[in-house]
Image (cartoon, rainbow, N blue to C red):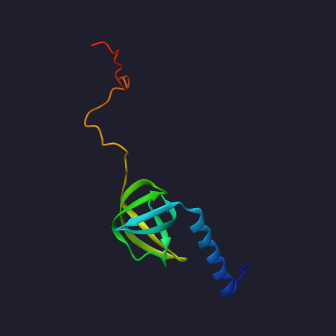
Amino acid sequence: MEEFLTKEIQAGLDAARMESLRKGSRLRLEVGGDVYRVLRMWKTGFSVDVEDAPKLRGLVDLYDGSLHLFQCLIVASEEDAGEMQYEFKRATAVADRPPLDFERASDAPLGLIEDGRA
């Protein structure tokens, strides 16, 4: 048996769901100085409130609070239930140091200790 909700009740439920997503996410997207809150993120993409974001595409930066997570190449996918969904064409993790151009031995010392004698 199928039950149908009135448009007003469905709109209220949708608004409550969007508010819950907005409050629960620390993820944000930066594009050319503009900041957009990410509502949800999954392995191949993410979603942003359709009212906040235009149909973005290209290179963007994805943050969790102040922590820079990914530099992404994205394309707009579809609009669904008040969310604009985007897909990653590329998502490169941001490192806190430059990559090594040689293999580091697993038993290599982490540092050298001087004894103070010269």
In the displayed image of the protein, which residue is found farthest to the left?
A: 101
Above or below: residue 61 compared with residue 9: above
Residue 46 x %, y %: 47, 64
Toward the right, the furthest residue is: 1
Picture quarter with the N terminus: bottom right
Q: Where is the C terminus found, in terms of image quarters?
A: top left
Residue at the image position 66 percent from the left and 80 percent from the top: 12
Is 22 displayed left or right of 114 in the figure? Answer: right
Q: Nearer the viewer, residue 109 or 72?
A: 109
Residue 68 coordinates in the image, percent (x, y): 42, 54
**How many numbered marks does the figure carry?**
0
Question: Residue at point 34% right, 18% down?
Answer: 114
**Residue at image location 65% in from the left, 74% down from the top:** 16
Q: Is residue 5 above or below residue 36?
A: below
Q: Nearer the viewer, residue 42 or 65?
A: 65
Is residue 20 found left or right of 82 in the rendered image?
right
Residue found farthest to the top: 117
Q: Position of residue 74 (x, y in %)?
A: 36, 65
On the image, which quarter does residue 8 sit in? Answer: bottom right
Q: Identify whether 94 is placed above or below 90.
A: above
The residue sitting at 48% across, 70% down in the picture is: 48
Q: Position of residue 10 (x, y in %)?
A: 66, 81
